[in-house]
Amino acid sequence: MADLNYSIDMISNLILEAKRVVVFTGAGVSTESGIPDFRSPGGIWSKYDPEEFTIQKFLSSPEARRTHWKMLTEGGLTMEAEPNPAHYAIAELYRLGKLDCVITQNVDNLHQEAGVPRDRVFELHGNMQCAVCLNCHKRFSMKEILQQIREGIETPDCPDCHGIIKPDAVFFGEALPQTTVMEATSRSQNCDLFIVIGSTLAIYPAAYMPAYAQSAGAKLAIINLSPTPLDHQATIVIQGKAGEIMSQVMKKVNNKMSSRRKPPSISQ
């Protein structure tokens, strides 16, 4: 792996040269805000059997819905997490006019809270801050639903039509939101720099996005704690924590932009 300072300098140059940057984020960004991972050792699927959490079981069984809601409330997925330095660094890219959009596998709403406009965040797996009635499609805040659960309602239903209420996230066996996937695919194919942050690129179809970008001619940068299947195709790879690396990258970007804006000195 290249020297860290060199790698950070290289990514900063790629950002400065780019006209349209797409950032793709995974669980490695969320975990730095204290949100538990699903698949890592000690993660949620080491405590629960993922086979029990399919959309089919959720729809067909009140007992399965009780288990779902218990897992979601006890597992920390709906906790009051706050954005971390990685989220703020990505939002800084938007403020600098470099970021086209964020495509995320995360369901925590933290990119929006950090300052990326909602219409620039494409959530491939939904958003756990909301719930929806599957019958009349009324939307609820997750805080409202969790309050009902704390008051003893184990399987909350819609107050208007008594339909099943489901977290607005993609369950096993459930299709990804097609409009979101299509827009994310289009933006991936039309960027000139695609930055992966905190994803092992192991979950499909989400992990196709960097491949779409690269096939269309974009440069690929990867920042992740562990290797990914696309490391050998990337222009630059940094193995490290998302917040630490992105903070250094954006500091370098801002310093270089400031230097470029300075008027040349005039010799007397």
Image (tube, helix red, strand yellow):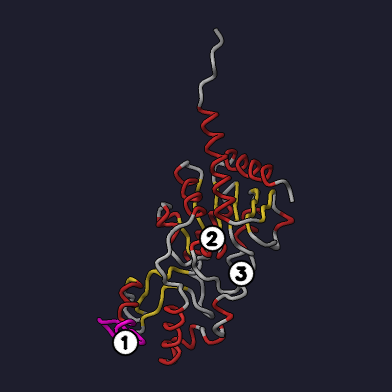
Q: Are marks 1 and 2 in contact (CB under 8 Å)?
A: no
Q: Position of residue 254 (x, y in %)?
A: 52, 38
Tag 2: amino acid: Val
For residue 157, above or below residue 31: below
Residue farthest top in this picture: 268
User: In the rendered view, would you say 164 is above or below 209?
Assistant: below
Choose the circle earlier in sequence order: 3 or 1. Answer: 1
Residue at image mark 2: 29
CB-based contact (under 8 Å), mark 3 and mark 1: no
Q: Is residue 159 magenta?
A: yes
First in residue order: circle 2 vs circle 3? 2
Residue located at (43% from left, 68% from top) = 127
Residue 221, position as x, y percentages in the image: 64, 51
Residue 141 figure quarter: bottom left
- Density class for disc 2 (Cα within 10 Å; few <14, some 14-19, many ≥20) is many
Q: Residues within 10 Å of mark 3 (few under 14, many from 20)?
A: few
Residue 58 is covered by the magenta coloring = no
Q: Tell me where the magenta segment starts and ends, as one range.
A: 149-163
Mark linked to residue 152: 1
Which residue is the site of mark 3?
Answer: 204
Q: State which tag comes first along the sequence, 1 or 2.
A: 2
Using the numbered discs, state the Cα–Cα distance from disc 2 to disc 3 in whole angstroms: 18 Å
